[in-house]
């Protein structure tokens, strides 16, 4: 495998890198921010890319927020953005269900395990659903639940799909419902299957904490609508009509972001070292994916601006 | 592979089968009962085996109950038993921790995900623990939890082991604590890794719903102390000093019960069709394990009594 090119500190290489692409697909957690902390220099880096005419799309596997909620987060963190620039796994899932899966009535309802982000995106695509943040599902199991879930009297006969995403309120009641719907033939989807969720400079259980128990209990893997699933890239391509050869995926995770870009035959992949993976991970003999380029942090691309101002008249 | 011998209705074969063994290890769920319903004729079948001088040991992967609690269940269901006849995965785990793992102080505490059965067995072996049924862990995550779990201020520095068992109150807070202890080097144990839990003639998420998200997030498999783990059979053998050649494992699951008996080189394995697996499962080309004998239901062994009474004087 080719060794990834290290761009940090190499102004000429950074400029050449930026010139190669029209579109940058950017992961958020571990690239733009960690939790609610924006990495220094990132807003200026995004402005630099925009000032050079680059299209920016934020591509995130985090399904807990809808695009509107993401926009609020961007704004509150001082990052200029637009809802049309944001592409999350909740949105990707809603689009897949409404435009590709097209569940026939009467079994066209989705049983959701996840947070409000999924619900908002399903609503925006007019997909009927139950579960999610409904308080009726945020409680302990009772003997009546065991009985009614087992014999089906507590199940909604219109559910034809289970959508599993990161749920901070995961419980046995939701898992039991989902398992039973799957056993009765519901389509098994996951917004994403990230094993961990980065927060407060550490790792918490990811969306996989919701889908792996169901996959293990049913012997069936969900179709994942987040990175590295190519279903997500197809949806992005359909929406933005991008030229894959002139598109670069930027991310911190080899097994989601970088794999996503490589399998999607994008023109390039850029790894940053502010998140999950380090240089040792892609240098390992069993590396899951190797990026084409890497920087220590996204804001290292700002060095390109130095050259720009050096070139500018009066300097 | 040899075809399993079907004993149902064959009095001579049943008698020959019973005579081959001194000890019967019996799974409970799916063999003796399902949920709180005892299968018809089972108490009489156990009495028949005892009357022929057979040792009976109930071997269950269900960790939600301690041996004492199991004894209460047996008694309430009209099955005569003794606490010394009961061997559950919670007990097996407690024995493993106290007698084999022997965690050195000060990191000798266990973080438990699971129900009271695990706690009671850990107490009986004087193993210190936190978590479990403690109400402090039965609630939603707060931003302070994310922070304190991430930076370690909310973690107990004495925890050196995570024990994951079936927990009807599983939540994100418990999974987050467990993940962080594992990331800090705690030993990863599971009472068992059953994918499903039989209840009300149907299936609910098993202990694997607790351990698979942690295994997926850490890339590390737990040491399981339930069937088919041979750690459990070693513990049973140590306690009962059984002659493996004259011991038969009786169960409904190929991937736990029957595999357990075969890998433990027991003299025999008997499958019953009142639980998870059916004849088609061991006849499949990729069958995980094939029993030596099978009956439609455990009480089919009672036919042996008919011959006995036929032999009795006065008949």
Image (spheres, coloured by chain):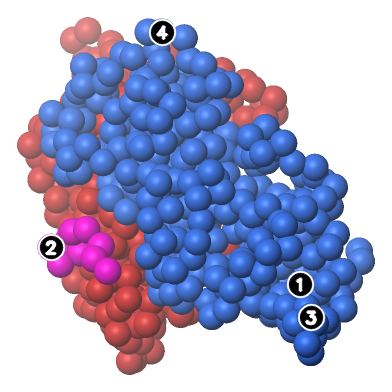
Chain colours: A red, B blue
Residue that appears at 32% across and 76% down: A147
Task: Give the chain of mark 3.
Answer: B
SS at mark 2 in the image: helix
Q: Mark 2 and mark 1: span between their CA atoms?
A: 46 Å
Q: Is residue A190 above or below residue A253?
A: below
Q: Is residue A135 magenta?
A: yes
Q: Decide which of tag 4 and tag 1 comes sooner along the chain.
A: 4
Task: State the CA–CA distance, disc 3 to disc 2.
Answer: 65 Å
Answer left or right for B54 relative to A276: right
Residue, disc 1? B294
Q: Is residue B57 left or right of residue A227?
A: right
State whether discs 4 and 2 lie on one chain.
Answer: no
The range drawn in magenta is: A133-143
Residue B137 in the image: x percent, y percent? 21, 38
Badge 3 is on which residue? B312
Pointers 4 and 3 in contact (C-beta within 8 Å): no
Quadrant of the rendering where the C terminus of chain A is positioned: top left
Chain for numbered disc 1 = B
Location of residue A139 in the rendering, given as x and y in whole percent from the top left corner: 18, 59
Q: Mark 4 = which residue? A: B105
Q: CA distance from mark 4 to mark 1?
A: 48 Å
Classify residue B248 by image quadrant: bottom right
Q: Is residue B286 left or right of residue B131?
A: right
């Amino acid at each position: 495998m080719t060794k990834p090119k290290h761009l940090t500190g190499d102004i000429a290489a950074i400029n050449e890198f930026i010139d190669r692409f029209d579109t940058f697909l950017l992961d958020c957690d571990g690239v733009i921010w960690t939790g609610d902390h924006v990495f220094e220099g990132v807003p200026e880096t995004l402005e630099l890319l925009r000032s050079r005419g680059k299209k920016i799309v934020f591509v995130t596997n985090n399904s807990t927020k809808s695009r509107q909620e993401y926009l609020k987060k961007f704004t509150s963190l001082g990052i200029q953005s637009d809802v049309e620039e944001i592409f999350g796994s909740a949105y990707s899932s809603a689009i897949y269900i409404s435009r590709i899966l097209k569940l026939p009535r009467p079994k066209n309802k989705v049983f959701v395990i996840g947070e409000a982000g999924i619900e908002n995106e399903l609503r925006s695509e007019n997909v009927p659903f139950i579960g999610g943040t409904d308080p009726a599902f945020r409680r302990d199991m009772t003997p009546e639940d065991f009985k009614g879930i087992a014999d089906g009297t507590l199940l909604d006969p219109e559910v034809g799909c289970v959508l599993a995403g990161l749920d901070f309120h995961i419980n046995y009641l939701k898992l039991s419902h989902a398992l039973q719907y799957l056993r009765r033939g519901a389509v098994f989807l996951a917004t994403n299957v990230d094993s961990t969720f980065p927060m407060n400079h550490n790792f918490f259980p990811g969306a996989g904490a919701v889908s792996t128990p169901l996959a293990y209990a049913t012997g069936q893997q969900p179709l994942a609508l987040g990175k590295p699933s190519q279903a997500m890239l197809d949806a992005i391509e359909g929406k933005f009509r991008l030229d894959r050869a002139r598109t670069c995926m930027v991310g911190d995770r080899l097994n989601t972001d970088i794999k996503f870009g490589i399998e999607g035959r994008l023109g390039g992949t850029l790894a940053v070292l502010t998140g999950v993976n380090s240089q040792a991970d892609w240098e390992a003999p069993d590396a899951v994916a190797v990026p084409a380029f890497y920087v220590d942090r996204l804001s290292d691309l700002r060095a390109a601006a130095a050259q720009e101002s050096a070139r500018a008249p009066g300097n």
